[in-house]
Image: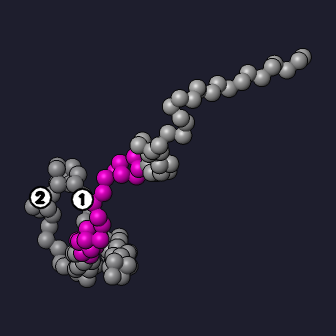
Amino acid sequence: MFTFFLILLVIDSFLLAAAVLLQAGQGGGLSAEFGGASSTDAFVGGRQAANLLTRASWWTGGIFLGLCFILSLISARNAQPRSVLQGQFQQQAPAPLAPLPLQNAAPTTTPNAAPTTPSKAPAPAR
């Protein structure tokens, strides 16, 4: 559905650009409105007949805005809010540790036995 509306929006944008670029200019622009040329028309300009290109501009502009609004509603429903930092601070879980030996297990040495010390091996000859 989103792709369908997006294709319609692209087609409408090309039609809108063509309709606007094919229109003839009014000749004065803003410089004529503010004293650059002698003009007796109102601030917005003289009244002109609504021809096909003017109507096409208004219709394609309205359709463009409507399609943009529909696309924004569709994309807002599909997107889940998430933090910008969410992907940066995620770390992999450490490997599980080996279980600790039981504290109350029977000792392996007898209490009367002397502790064994490792024997020192003689240093190798050089």
Say whether residue 61 is visible: no
Coloring scheme used: one colour
Residue 40 spot, x, y in % from top left: 11, 59
Q: Nearer the viewer, residue 102 or 48?
A: 102
Q: Which residues lie in the magenta part?
A: 67-90
Location of the C terminus by quadrant is top right
Say whether residue 91 is visible: yes
Circle 2 — which element? Answer: loop
Estimate the spatial distance between the alpha carbons at disc 2 and disc 1, rounded to whole Å.
Answer: 11 Å
In the depicted structure, whether residue 114 falls above or below residue 44: above
In the depicted structure, whether residue 24 falls above or below residue 111: below
Residue 75 spot, x, y in % from top left: 29, 70
Q: Residue at x 24, y 59 (%)?
A: 28
Residue 10 spot, x, y in % from top left: 37, 75
Quadrant of the image occupied by residue 108: top right
Report the amino acid beneath label 2.
Answer: Phe
Q: Is residue 76 magenta?
A: yes
Quadrant of the image occupied by residue 79: bottom left
| Residue for badge 1 | 28
Q: Residues within 10 Å of mark 1 (few under 14, many from 20)?
A: few
Q: Nearer the viewer, residue 72 or 105?
A: 105
Q: Residue at x 16, y 50 (%)?
A: 34
Residue 82 spot, x, y in % from top left: 30, 57
Location of the N terminus by quadrant is bottom left
Q: Earlier in the sequence, mark 2 or mark 1?
A: 1
The mark found on residue 43 in the picture is 2
Q: Nearer the viewer, residue 63 or 84?
A: 84
Q: Residue at x 14, y 62 (%)?
A: 44
Quadrant of the image occupied by residue 59: bottom left
